[in-house]
Amino acid sequence: MLHYGLVNNGRFVREHMEFFNRLLADEGPLDGRRVLDIGCGKSYWLSLLVASAGATAIGIDTEAVDATRGIAKYKQIFRRNGFERTLRTGVWDVLFAHRYYNALERRLGKPLPHASVDLRVYDGTHIPLADASVDLVVSHEVFEHIADVRAVLAEVARVLKPSGKTYIYIHNYTSVSGGHHIAWKYPDSEPSRVVPPWDHLRGRRYCDIPSWLNRVREHEYRELFAEFFDIIEWRHTATEGAGLLTEAIRTELSAYSESELLTKGLLVRARTRSPASKSGVH
């Protein structure tokens, strides 16, 4: 993982800026809007970029997030999340953070507004914000790690204003990289010679990954989002693994559609449900 992070740091920056630019193209100016970033992560990159666009940015995570390296930060992470998470955050801070932020600033063309982002710790379900207080909820590759997706979506619906929207990107579990094994991060350009493709759906012989996954499938996400929101767009953002899907694997994974196996990401653009939709009128 250390080697992977050092080699791909610049690639992460490019990918993050591409997602941010897509967000701006889809949602328009963010200036003056209150934006909540769910699962902002230790780098809170999306919160920073949203704030750089003039939004009031709030980043929430189950881990204490702070750009500094104070001992109080690591103590808090240790108490809440244990030794492994504390170690991983410390390694990020020492080896990656400075290089990453510098590269992101160069891409952005201006300093990152660390001081203006409101960072909060939450319990993974209950969002620490008032009802109808947010204009836009964003999230990037987080929902596949949420244990109770329905509960979190109910909270998203609660904190969004009547005109509020979601812009939520989910890493599709059934994709070849969806098992989050580091060997399959870039399956088309860097296929693994050790871990079989779609191992997380097949033998699960190499399931030692650094994070927990809920294994929710696309049709289940659709049903959950439709409970709370009017879906504006359900976008497949990329495909991967077409050259890896042999006839033998396709037969073995016949319980999954080809689209499920080849779609890497799901972008959910939705809005707060209208009164007509709530009453059953469509």
Image (cartoon, helix red, strand yellow):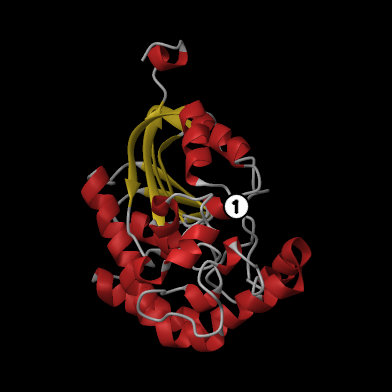
Left or right position of 165 against 142:
left
Say which residue appears at 28% left-offset and 64% top-offset: 18
Depth check: 123 or 192 in front?
A: 192
- The image shows residue 148 at horizontal and vertical percentages of 65, 42
Please tell me whether residue 187 is drawn above or below residue 134 in the rendered image: below
For the N terminus, the quadrant is bottom right
- The image shows residue 244 at horizontal and vertical percentages of 41, 71
Query: How would you rate the neighbour count of disc 1 (Cα within 10 Å): few for under 14, some for 14-19, many for 20 or more?
Result: some
Kind of residue indicated by mark 1: Arg
Using the rendered view, name the quadrant where residue 80 is placed.
bottom right
Asked if residue 137 shows in the view, the reply is yes
Depth check: 113 or 17 in front?
A: 17
Residue indicated by mark 1: 215
For the C terminus, the quadrant is top left
Say which residue appears at 46% left-offset and 10% top-offset: 279
Please tell me whether residue 59 is drawn above or below residue 234 in the rendered image: below
- The image shows residue 102 at horizontal and vertical percentages of 36, 79
Please tell me whether residue 13 is drawn above or below residue 157 in the rendered image: below
- The image shows residue 196 at horizontal and vertical percentages of 54, 75
Asked if residue 164 shows in the view, the reply is no
Circle 1 — which element?
loop
